[in-house]
Amino acid sequence: MATKLYVGNLPFNTTENELQELFSQAGAVQEVMLMQDKFTGKSRGFAFVTMGSDQDAQKAIAEINGKTLEGRALTVNEARPREPRPPGGGGGGYGGGGDRRRDGGQRRGR
């Protein structure tokens, strides 16, 4: 059964192809998802790699966790399911203050 791994502390210029190559040394890689900022398109410094089997995933964790890539020690562990989020947008704050001058907008001394 396929196992999804979390890969953290990635250099921001890492590509999906580089991760594919790195993790394929430990076994069959089914998918690489490099997480990017949805507004800038730049890397967020982490990825998810799906390995073909639990054995391949455990081998990848053992071999790659703590390994240095471009001066950064990688974090590799089994991905956890996302925490459920409450529905809704959480509401907004209060609006801006606007001009609350009590003198009708007149400046003193003019």
Image (tube, rainbow, N blue to C red):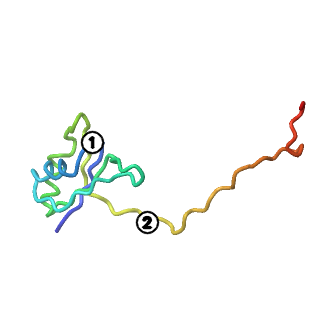
The relative height of residue 33 versus residue 72 in the rendered view (above or below) is below
What residue do we see at 89% from left, 32% from top? 110
Does 43 sit left or right of 29 as displayed?
right
The N terminus sits in image quarter: bottom left
Q: How many marks?
A: 2
Disc 2 secondary structure class: loop
Please identify the residue farthest to the top as the structure is shown: 109
Disc 1 secondary structure class: loop
Does 55 sit left or right of 90 as displayed?
left
Tell me the tag on residue 49: none
Residue 36, position as x, y percentages in the image: 34, 52
Q: The residue under label 1 is which amino acid type?
A: Asn
Residue 102, position as x, y percentages in the image: 88, 45
In this view of the protein, which residue sits in the foreground, 86 or 47?
A: 47
In this view of the protein, which residue sits in the foreground, 22 or 65?
A: 22
Reading the image, the residue beneath label 2 is: 84
- Say few, some or many: other residues with alpha carbon within 10 Å of mark 1 (under 14 / 14 to 19 / 20 or more): few
What residue do we see at 16% from left, 48% from top? 62
Q: The residue under label 2 is which amino acid type?
A: Pro
Reading the image, the residue beneath label 1 is: 13
Which of labels 1 and 2 is toward the front? Answer: 1
The relative height of residue 103 versus residue 54 in the rendered view (above or below) is above
Please identify the residue farthest to the front as the structure is shown: 110
In this view of the protein, which residue sits in the foreground, 90 or 44?
A: 44
Residue 65, position as x, y percentages in the image: 21, 45
What residue do we see at 20% from left, 61% from top? 31
Work out how far the residue at label 1 is from the one at label 2, CA to CA, in angstroms.
30 Å
Mark 1 touches mark 2? (CB < 8 Å):
no
What residue do we see at 85% from left, 43% from top? 105
Label 1 or label 2, whichever comes before in sequence order: 1
- Say few, some or many: other residues with alpha carbon within 10 Å of mark 2 (under 14 / 14 to 19 / 20 or more): few
